[in-house]
Amino acid sequence: MTNSEIIYGIDDRPPAPVAGLTALQHVLASFVGIITPTLIIGGVLGLGSEVPYLISMALIVSGVGTFIQARRFGPVGSGLMALQGTSFAFLSSILAAGFIAKGKGGGPDEILSLIFGVCFLGAFIEIFLSQFLHKLKVFVTPLVTGIVITTIGLYLIKVGMTDLAGGFKAPDLGSLENLALGGSVLLIIIILNQSSKPILRSGAIFYGLIIGFIAAWFMGKVDFSMLADMDLVAIPTPFKYGFSFDVEAFIPVAFIYLITAIES
């Protein structure tokens, strides 16, 4: 039985123009989701000049992680086009860790040192769980995983609506201008997704984003002035901020790693 809504099956190879378009669309659609947690953490914790570097590193690691996940290297990777990026689930626990370091008089370097330290150690929890998580199918039933995924989706509605209304901490958050712009992009995507032409349906999000960007430009909402003081290329610096540890900061982060293992 075939589904008329599906343009390409799982083993199909779309033509190069369609594949290129959808790949670009995938990057553009995920871009904001990857950098937003970094922007929130940097803004709330007052990391200032460190934020551009952190955004660059989030994007680089997302690219490397996605490549490994898709291509598979030995036992590592799913072999599927599973985008790897930052997670909103960690926001509260990472902010808590940052406030612990800040409460002890630490500056941006000390804050990031603690955040990276507890996240680095917490990652081993997920690595460990990955070795036998498949054996827990008796307990982690489709009902359990379904509830987890539904909860994630419901949580992300808030994130999506915040972005549509202007973005986190925007001075004009929720203004009619922002809602009209975001709503128009959403409407364009829905309309194009109903098209009978594969090139329009496959690239509906891409076309919506481009039209929305052009509209935002004419509305005076596009500003590249802050890019003038930034480096064209950011080179990763291993252990740039060092590692520190605090058990009070580690426990909430470790718990989130446990949750994201089930989510994955």
Image (tube, rainbow, N blue to C red):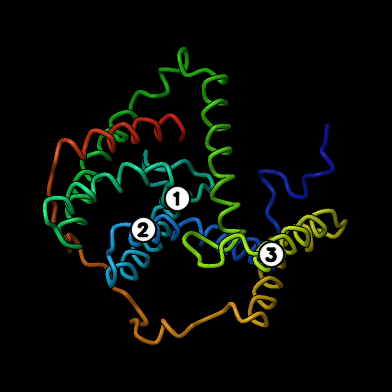
In front: label 3 or label 2:
3
First of labels 3, 2 by sequence position? 2
Residue 65 in the figure: left or right of residue 7: left
At 45% from the left and 85% from the top, the residue drawn is 225
Q: Which residue is mark 3?
A: 176
Residue 231 in the figure: left or right of residue 262: left
Residue 142: percent from left, percent from top: 56, 21
Q: Is residue 164 above or below residue 93?
A: below
Helix, strand or loop status at disc 3? helix
Total marks in image: 3
Helix, strand or loop status at disc 1? loop
At 51% from the left and 29% from the top, the residue drawn is 148
At 21% from the left and 57% from the top, the residue drawn is 112
Q: Which residue is mark 2?
A: 61
Mark 1 is on which residue type?
A: Gln
Q: Which residue is mark 1?
A: 84
